[in-house]
Image (cartoon, rainbow, N blue to C red):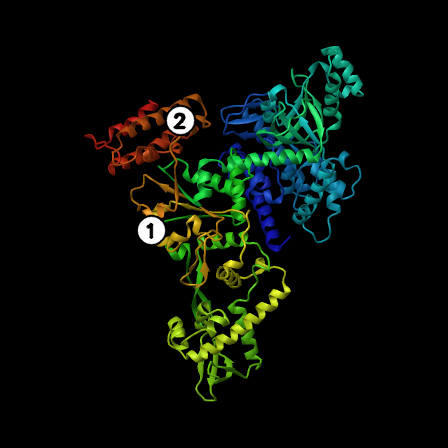
Amino acid sequence: MGKSEWQSCEEAYGAFVAEFPPETLKSMPLARYTNLNRDDSFCYWLETRTDRLGGIWGGSAYKFGIYKWENEPSRMSGRSSDNEYAWYTKYGGSAEEAYGNVCANIDKIARYALAGEFEAIDGIDMGPAVKWKIAFLYADHKLVGIFNPEMLVAAAEVSGIENASSLPMSQLQRRLMEMKPYGMDVFEYGKYLWPRAKEYLESKRQYWLYSPGEGAYNMEQDLANNTMAVGWPAVGNLTSFKNKKEIQHRLEEEYGSAKGQSTNAKSLYDFSRSIRLGDVVIAKQGVWNIVGIGVVKSDYRYDAELDEFPNIRDVDWYQTGEWLVKNQLPRKTLTMKDKSFYDHIMKQIKEHIIMANLDRPRMKLLTRKKQIVLQGAPGTGKTYSTAEIAVSICNPEFDGQNNRDAVMKEYRRLMADGRIGFTTFHQSMDYEEFVEGLKPVPEKVGLVFRPQAGIFREMADRALLAAIKRDKNQINDTVNFDEAWAELKERIESNGIEAINTRNNQKITKLQISPQGDIRCTANGGNVKYTISIERLKKLYGVYGTLKSLDGMKNIYEDITSVIGGCNTSIYWAVLREILKYKESMDAERLANEAEPDIESYDDDRLQSFIDELLTAREKVDYKDDAPAYVLIIDEINRGNISKILGELITLLEADKRLGEQNELTAVLPYSRRHFGVPSNLYIVATMNTADRSTGSIDYAIRRRFGFVTVEADRKVVEDFGYDSPKTKEAALKLFDSVVALMDSVNTSFNRRDMMPGHSYFLAPTVDELKMKLTYELQPLLREYCNDGILDFYKDEKGEYAEIERLADIFA
């Protein structure tokens, strides 16, 4: 583990305890434990903010004991809920009572962890992953960051601990910590153990094809409970039978001796005896559809209170949907399969997911045009949608589009990896900020202005390097100016160069390095000292970067002064030629000794030189067919002066002008003087507020290069939102419909659908919050519409727009 990664883990570890000191847990309010803010609750920190220390993802939110719900939970045995929270009934009859017991458990876990009394934690009634993650965070580096029971057992077994499956988690933790290598911190130890445990677990893993009732009608209950369950309730508890024959006999007694009872007996026997923790379950519907993939999380148990499916195992259903398969599946309730069957099913599911992600109209438009604008009125979810689009194009295999938390987790991961970038246009933004500008850099001689990449050039460079095939026969690792200059400088300082010849064979002698880092010299044995500026020399190199181009000058005075202005052109020509000789000699040596360029180790100057070399020898470059996608999101694109910001990019953005395409184009950037092009695997997703008349419009030249997708207010989103009561839902829908009616009065100069306020203005869980949204967000917007002439309403004698004020009557 690198130092920066260790620091990151240590900071997250300390930040959690600082945010939730152990002495405050006993009095922690329920709203602090769980809420919908997704950034400040104990549960959010435990699962997401400290994810790098060890994950507890998967399963339902019930694993926290109690949680604040967004979508109303379904009614089921062992679980309770009210208009805000859902919890396990075993903790109490009300949210307050349940949280009191959960909070007491958390307080005990933290205190025992601090005291090192880990055995006491085993008996606390809370999900193992959650309670051991809490213990880990308060144990002051005395526990391993693995909280999944079967993964911890696998880590113990692969480490040589005997009978690991029979040991409690506290003992497994102690034994593993005793085996931790000296000098290795717990974060690194956890990351060391995890892949070994995973590989070991997968080598033992079994695969089961499972039918959750006829036509998969019990699958909804399985998903809600995170279980798999089989029927034949009259048989009773399966652990009371010694073998499959006894189960078959009971089946025949209770259900008749019809053909197939032997098969049913085997299914029941395997369900209770053969399935192991960590096994994979593939749920099917009929013989042609897969509806879920999960991992077994518990041993067999029997629940006599359940009438139809009393035989149960806990399962973490990590992938659900409905996918048609190509080959008919067995009809049995439970069938053992092998890894090749699982791989075959997962390949088909992957194909379905990619098709679903990329086959939507806006995704088709994006892949064809390379850049789209989501346009619409405020509140329609344009910016909200950019995350889903970016994740879909960057990771077509992602299967969590219906789970906002999962989308945002993947979005943040891709952003951290540099695959997604985000910026907002504004009136003062310009080309220098977006593409490339000059930045003052302090050096020995004072401030020097150096080219600085903007976010678009950074994204384009990243995408290009990911798109090229790194084959030394196509591209080579070239030496940049600074490396060649460093070689010449070293030789001058060691007196290794007596003279350099000019083009007409005059001698340049007495070469020295000045205190400012430039070259001082004389010519033809004279006493006049000349100074060769390295910055001017580098600028000249930007135009004449090869011996062939330098030797090909027809008039060195005109050619050189046109680039760097007045100077002793003969001396500049001679010194630059010496640098280029070093460069080309070093290039040849590097090409002979290196299999492929080690791009990841380059500093910025060397990287820019490498990219410039790529784009000046484009016939040697081959691009991957499956290059990973990169996405730049531009929020409020019409708030900036787009022509000024984009500059020459207006042409380079076109799909057929991209690098690797038939009509590819490049341009020379104005400050770095390097070549630049836009790779085909870089996409732009922008948003535009169509109701904002204070900003400039997008001209036709730019419009031609973008695809435009209109995002409208959606009544169904309002209808499906999680309200605290039917009364709130009724008020929200009535308010939405009332505003739709007001839009009949939109001035004919405007498009009605561009002006209808978006559904976010109507999403509030309570009546009080909905009133606040109306008073402080929606009505002010509609009044501005009137002031701007968008709505054809006039003020009454009170100076008010009566039609807008009457919206409050909905709550009367």
Q: Position of residue 482 (x, y in %)?
A: 52, 69
The amino acid sitting under disc 1 is Asn
Closer to the camera in the image, 537 or 556: 556
Question: What is the quadrant of the C terminus in the image?
Answer: top left
Identify which residue is drawn at 42% across, 60% down: 669
From what the image shows, is residue 545 above or below residue 739?
A: below
The amino acid sitting under disc 2 is Val
Q: Position of residue 697 (x, y in %)?
A: 31, 45
- What number is the disc on residue 38? none
Q: Is residue 221 left or right of residue 643?
A: right
Identify which residue is drawn at 62% across, 44% down: 53
Please name the residue that numbered disc 1 is placed on: 641
Distance in Å between CA atoms under marks 1 and 2: 41 Å
Q: Classify mark 2: residues with Cα within 10 Å, few (<14), some (14-19) or many (20+).
A: some
From what the image shows, is residue 551 above or below residue 405?
A: below
Q: How many numbered marks have been drawn onto this rendered protein structure?
A: 2
Q: Position of residue 483 (x, y in %)?
A: 54, 69
Q: Secondary structure at mark 2?
A: helix
Is residue 285 visible in the rendered image? The answer is: yes
Q: Position of residue 237 (x, y in %)?
A: 73, 18
Please name the residue that numbered disc 2 is placed on: 767
Identify which residue is drawn at 77% across, 37% down: 164
Q: Secondary structure at mark 1?
A: loop
Q: Is residue 718 left or right of residue 324?
A: left
Q: Classify mark 1: residues with Cα within 10 Å, few (<14), some (14-19) or many (20+).
A: many
Identify which residue is drawn at 47% across, 76% down: 518
Closer to the camera in the image, 671 or 34: 671
From what the image shows, is residue 205 above or below residue 435?
A: above
Q: Is residue 608 left or right of residue 376?
A: right
Give the mark, 1 or 2, whose residue is nearer the N terminus. Answer: 1
Foreground mark, 1 or 2, reads 1
Question: Which image quadrant for residue 151?
Answer: top right
